Image: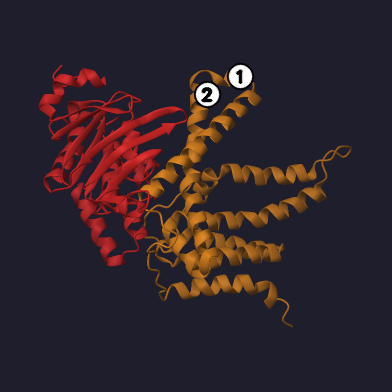
Chain colours: A red, B orange
Amino acid sequence: MIETDGLVHRYDETAAVDGVSLTIDDGEAVAVVGANGSGKTTLVRHFDALLEPDEGTVRVDGRDVTEQPVYARTRVGMVFQNPRDQFVAGTVGADVAFGPENLGLDRTEIDRRVDEALTAVDMAGRGDERIDRLSGGEQARVAIAGALAMDPDHLVLDEPLVGLDRPTCESVLEHLRSLSASGTGLVVVTHDLRDVVDLVGRVVGMADGRVALDAEPERALDRLDDVGVRDPRC
Amino acid sequence: MLTYEPGDSLAHGLDPRGKLAVQFGLAVAVFAYPTARGFAVGGAVALAALAAGRLSPLRVVRAYWAVFLFLAVGPLVGGAALGDPWFRVGPAVESLRSVARVVPVVFVGAVYVRTTPVRETRAAIQRVVPGKVGRLFGVGVGLVFRLFPVVLADLRATRRAVHARAGQRRPLHDRVRRILTRGLARSFLRADRLTLALRARCFAWNPTLPSLAVRRRDYPVAALGAALAASPVLALVP
């Protein structure tokens, strides 16, 4: 479970996240929506202890993430907006193995996790391929596999569909639906709800660093104007 | 820019420690013997390495053209003089001999880069250099291999962006300034993003490294590296 309590994060004098209290249960699929600069990315980066709160706390399974950042990062997998920002190795297998290697797991367990993660995103048997020769959609799937190999309870995806064409979007969404069905919690950050409205069971809308909307998708659709997000029915 | 490419060549199957030994030994040998025989041995080792890695020398020259251009300019600069005669052959030949020592080392290095995954290099370094120094060195090499091609790609992208808006009409110094300042800014941005990615994926100084295994075919490679490295000392034996 991910909990934030009175979370504040400032960039200089500007509060990007301003007193956010939120609870995300295990297995829950949540869309975090909002206009550019509303604080979505800053908020979710706190789930992974990639930023330090100016005020308030963030807990994963009841543990303060600033005190136990490695625990938070193993339970909450992060997929960055641009997959290329996430890759730290030249080949698919080496990159997916990077996280488990850092956890000090033995080679058999690492290989098992890599195989499972690549299978989950339909990239089984492609571990030797160079990442820079993959298509955008394949790179997005490898980025997801890299996070899955940490065996997380939650997967946070920051604008996972930006820059992808329609068939590739569908492919990525299909894999996310499959992960959600298998019990992995999803937190999908987006400024466009159209693609993920069928995927999530809850919509959290951010505006000016605050939670301006927190509802089921059906009810949230009528209030999207409040958070500067396009209504997917339009 | 050459980077690791999976493959099944002989060089791909060799233990990285042996390959590093050959590189080190070759560098020692060619600098210890700036003679025709030394060049011949260096050239032979470089050609053997290229064959073992199934790598064309032309591809290496294309990938590292800036290095070769720099080396080629050396003898011209070395022979240039500020008075009559404007070009002196003696210093140019001397400079050429120095440059010629570097060429086989570049070729062998290129074969290594193309045939060795970065994490195997890190594993080899950490096994050869024990303790914190080895870990620090291994991580440093890994980060350089990861960042350098990305930074180069950014520089090329900046240059394309300058050209796309008729930037070539601007003076050379203005273009160079723009590309360098943007390149530097992008490098910092890249480093920042890479740091974030490393933290998100639990970067560790002492991770589980790939297992390295010495096989029968690695022995002659290691022996060659050792012989090359020891060649200056062996030459002193009467």
Q: Look at 37% across and 56% down and name the residue there.
A: B7
What residue is pinned by disc 1?
A: B170
Closer to us: A43 or A91: A43
Q: Look at 29% across and 39% down and name the residue there.
A: A5
The answer to whether residue B210 is left or right of residue A23 is right
Q: Earlier in the sequence, mark 2 or mark 1?
A: 2
Question: Horizontal and vertical percent for residue A3?
Answer: 25, 43
Choose top left, top right, bottom left or bottom right for residue A47.
top left
Labels 2 and 1 within one chain: yes
Measure how far apart labels 2 and 1 are at the Cα level.
10 Å
State which quarter of the image contains the C terminus of chain A: top left
Closer to us: B223 or A231: A231
- The image shows residue B73, relative to residue A72, as above or below, that is above
Label 1 element class: loop
Residue flagged by tag 2: what amino acid is it?
Val
Badge 2 sits on which subunit? B
* Residue A124 seen in the figure: no
Q: Check the image and name the residue furthest to the bottom.
A: B238
Question: Horizontal and vertical percent for residue A107?
Answer: 31, 66
What residue is pinned by disc 2?
A: B162
Badge 1 sits on which subunit? B
User: Mark 2 and 1 residues: CB-CB less than 8 Å, in contact?
Assistant: yes
Label 2 element class: helix
Choose top left, top right, bottom left or bottom right for residue A9.
top left
Q: Look at 33% across and 24% down and name the residue there.
A: A208
